[in-house]
Amino acid sequence: MLLTRRAAVALLLLSPRLTRLDAQGATAEATATRSPRTAIPTPRSRDASIAGRVVAAGTGEPVAEVTVRVSASPAVEPRAATTDRDGRFSVGGLPPGPVRLEARRMGYRAVDTTIVAGDGDTTRVVLTLAPLVAALPQVVVTGQRAPQERTDFDQLATPGRVGLTSTAVAAVPAVGERDLFRAVQLLPGVVARNDFSAGLNVQGGETDQNLILLDGVPLYAPFHLGGLFGAFIDPAIARVDLQEAGFAAPYGGRLSSLLDVTSREEHEARVSGSVNVSVLATSVVAGRTFGAGRGSWTVAARRTYADVLARTLARRTLPYHFEDGQAHATYALSEYTRVAGTGYVGADLLDGPLSAFGDTGSTGASRLHLDFGNAAGGVSLTHVIPGIGHGLRGDSVVATQRVSATRFASHFHLGSGAFRFDNSITQQLATGALTRFGPELGGTRALRAGYELSRYQTALVLSTTQLDAGGSGGRPPLTALALFADDEWRPTSSVLVRPGVRYERVDAAHWAGVSPRLAVKVFVTPDVALTAAAGRYTQWVQTVRNDQSPVPIGEYWMTSGQGVPVNSARHLVMGAERWFGATRFARVEGYYKRYDHLNEPNPASYANVPGSAFLRATGSAYGASVFLRQLDVGRAAGWLSYGYGVAARTVRDPRLGLGTPVTYAPVQDQRHTLNVVATYRFGPGAVGTWTMATRLGFGSGTPYTPQVGRAEVRSYDPATGEWTPVEGQPVLGPQESDRLPATRHVDVSASRHTRWFWGHPTTLSIAVTNVTNSPNVFAYSYQFNAAPPTRRALGGFPILPSIGLSVAFGAEPTPEAP
Amino acid sequence: MTAIVTAIVTAARTRARLGAVALLLLAAFALACEGSARVTAPGEDLIVVHGVLNPSLDTQSVLVERLQSGRDVIDTVTFDPSSPIRTGFGTPLSGASVVVADARGDSAVGVEARPAGTSTGVYRFVAPGGAIVPGGRYTLRVTAPDGRVVTGATMVPPANAIVMDTGAVNMSTTFDRGGPPLALSWPAASGTAEYLVRVDHPFLAYVALITDTATALPGTLVGFETGPAFLPGFDQTVTVSAVDSNLFDYMRPMRNQYLNARNHLRGGAGVFGSVALLVRRPLTVTAAYRDPFDGAYARDTTAAAPPPASVAPGGFTLTVYTAAGDAKFASGRTTDTTAGAAGGATTAAPRGVVAVLRMIGATDSVQVVVLRAWSGSDTAAVLLGHRDGTALRLVARAGGSTPAGPAGAGVPVTYRKVTGP
């Protein structure tokens, strides 16, 4: 009997062949599969219910935020439900018999059909919605305005997740270029070391401990100018989600956080995009759909003209520029199969004689060449296997398979061959998963099992005439295999549980381990939830860096292996979140992270001692944050974030030579951070309005290592016994034993949305950063050759105006999009 | 592999070139705020010691100085090898007790060199037992006048003898910069951290630390701080030495030598190490004339009231060794002649010459610097002017320690090319 009722599934499929749809959104082509028995009403009438999922035609992916209206008869009040992030909905309390289902969502063609609700049982349906991209080109739905955060709140057990749309990123006042990373730096728990580093220190972690994915493709150090700018072309980005801790089992390989970046997908049938001009760079983004709406492509390119500006304004040669290219394409091979691809390439290039940089070496004429950047590409295939509500396939099974390759390379050449340093890391990644959606144990469940197979190849080439170990080499190739299982289970309407486990094996490091993960969310009310998550995290690629450098330039990547063990950490996150309506929420979270194994660069490494490149370290981080947010779906938007954090590292300090453990606060140990971001749009339309934005920021002082003197390095001549001076070098005091002053930021911007350039929607933006001209000290330079000694503070950006222009073509802008 | 990785780590840090470049970029890019200098508290009052025991020398020396901590004013003066601290950006620590002892307990006490009663911080002594013994262990104890004590220890590399010392027989050989590399080899010395290859240079010696027991130095060798290591026309000495781990740690490229050096000295910073000289090769570097700027120049003696040879040598050679942008860098040696005892002309002791030719518009600007000897720490003369065909029309200026306004300064002098392309 149960089987019979479960078999009463109405499967309504809309044709993905959009050319068959009329421009008015006529009635969907639908088919229904019904059990003959369910068409016969039972004599004894009991309440019926309908549950099901809504998926997208062409891709089979779940569609959230769909309003499903159920009408049984004129005498019964219609019932309605909204689909969750998995596309699920359920409506109960229905009389058995025919019911009318209407499913609507902006940007999709509505479904209006009738099914028969079983007596006293739950009838399961799968509704397929077709996008309206071809039929209604004037309707643009990019997903930017969807309250994804609310969906996440309702459906995700994992805490500590914050999403930013491209609109939210664009609203943050910026120096020259709007920058995804700069916006992320203003989120709770994230520390920005200084104005010159777009790197992310999340909840006490290092900048290389964040897993950065662009449509699932990992990227390494996606920054320009040593971290001054993020590498993504922001108009080509739809949204970014930051998981600050406790991320689920499908993700691994990093200790700290997950930054998931999603490319923009074009919905216009004609080529559309924008040209964006700032004081530093110009970018162009363009895209369109193709194949009668089955696919879309987006390409973007950017180049800075810092070299031109420096020559014009500062009257100095700056033989430097950076450039990026991004591309993303999707195509629906069938109703249930979708393929997507993403590519990114970015490079910084600095090349010129040292004299161009002020080097006046007596016999100089050396040349300096520096370049670094990412090149990455990946393809993913998603296939949906529709189910019938039970059995192996459940409601449906989604199979995903992704392959990608990423290469980050840096080259530093100096002195016409005197010094040549090349480093690269290449990661070839294959990952796949099967996710079964289905009702289980009285609730809903998404069971996922998958793998992740990575092969890393690092190259280190050192060619020098003055070092003791010149030559070529690299770490042995490293293969890392991860198998994971993940269970998103909602046993009751008020409880979400997400257990998971990840088995990882890293061959070159002769290491294998199991990393359990668990997240739990309990809804006190539909708008209030308590969350907790814990897990173990590991990392086998890391940077060799100089924490004393205020910018992360010169870092290079290294894989684990001989002398470099796998890093590991444990996370515990607890929090509470309350929503006020659909677009506003408050969140409080606390975290504790314990780093069991860390590799810290050894400032006194000894070439003759294998493995001395790193110091073995342990560490911890704990803190709490408050996050108040108004989502960017109306005229007013923004957030307030406050974070308190404490971080510590313990190493065996080589300066002592005794192996005595030394504990210190790392450079990212900023105890208090406060950021307020607010935007307001004056007027309802997309054109002829103003948008004002401001950012207020405060950060307590971060640790730094003070200088206690300066010593002259002297060169010994074995033939004569004479000493000659070489260069003065700073003598450092105890590591990170002092703190920089607190920093303050007040940035404002105003954007005018109008029509210029033959009627094209145009946004003119004027921003002023550091309005109060706060010094925001990030380093000191000392003069110890005079009595008394002096110290000079090096500060961040002064008060700095900038201007930008964005011209859209091919599409009307949404009201919030500048 | 680890060695490579470690070297990269240290290299990337040491020269801090990347950081410097980054800061340059930032300064140009972001107009980084630089606050005004403010008085700050003096730094650490640390004793810095530089001492290397060397069996090939009769007299050993230890340099004792105070760390630049803002307690003393560091004067910038012309470098004098006999007072390497005071003239080398340091503050000598006078009145210290410097004692070096061997494993048997024999000790030697250093005596501070005080030329003209001026403290130098250079403490000289004869080795305990009469000579520094390869393979021997020695300790250093420096006691400052205020009672602070710095101690260190070293084991001299057990290299028994200098295997090649053409300098000892006064055999200087020429080395064609464009010819085959200079091949050197030496026997392995057990217990040696690494071998130090050093090439004299007028501005900053080229040094390389290598593990092999042979090397070949091409004439176009470039150091990333010195630039080209071999300069045409110069007398340069190439040495190879075995170094102990202390000196190796100090010399290898490090972000901060003094961090690490504290490992090997107690109570202070610096180094107390040892070397064993294995190879000494004095060379005269030559190169063929190829560039139009190359050649041997002689002073035009037809001019009235010519400047003295002290500020305008009678002649010099120049050979371009590298070029960048609109500049050519050249080096050479003076070719002065003096009256001999028998009335004939003899060649005076040559001195090094470096020159820069810049093409500025239609004019070739020329700067010729004559060194006092082979070191760039002091200049004898600076001549500025332009190239006129194959002639150099220059004006002598005061240079280095040459007092301002020397006789002949400001007088035009013309050099004509006598050989060369």
Image (tube, helix red, strand yellow):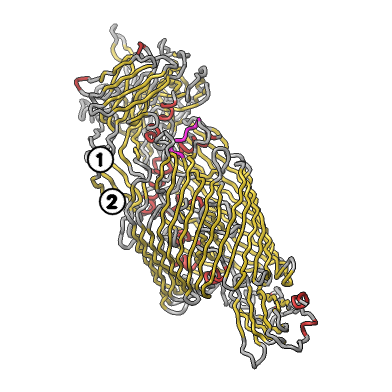
What type is the residue that disc 2 sits on?
A: Gly
Q: Residue furthest bottom?
A: A75
How many numbered marks have been drawn onto this rendered protein structure?
Answer: 2
Residue A560 drawn at (x, y percent): 56, 43
Q: Is residue B160 above or below residue A815?
A: above
Residue B135 occupies which quadrant of the picture?
top left
Residue B345 visible? The answer is yes
Q: Residue furthest top?
A: B342
Reading the image, the residue beneath label 1 is: B42
Residue A254 drawn at (x, y percent): 54, 52
For the N terminus of chain A, give its image quadrant: bottom right
Q: Residue furthest right?
A: A36
Circle 1 Cα neighbour tier, 10 Å, few/some/many (<14 / 14–19 / ≥20): some
> Is A606 inside the magenta-drawn segment?
yes
Residue A663 occupies which quadrant of the picture?
top left
Secondary structure, mark 2, is strand
Reading the image, the residue beneath label 2 is: B35
- Give the residue at x 30% y 49%: A793
User: Label for residue A133?
Assistant: none
Residue B141 drawn at (x, y percent): 32, 23
- Judging depth in this view, the residue of B248 and A35 nearest the camera is A35
- Give the residue at x 43% y 30%: B249
Judge if badges 1 and 2 mark residues of a common chain: yes
Magenta-colored span: A602-608
Q: Is residue B25 above or below residue A126?
A: above
Residue A46 occupies which quadrant of the picture?
bottom right
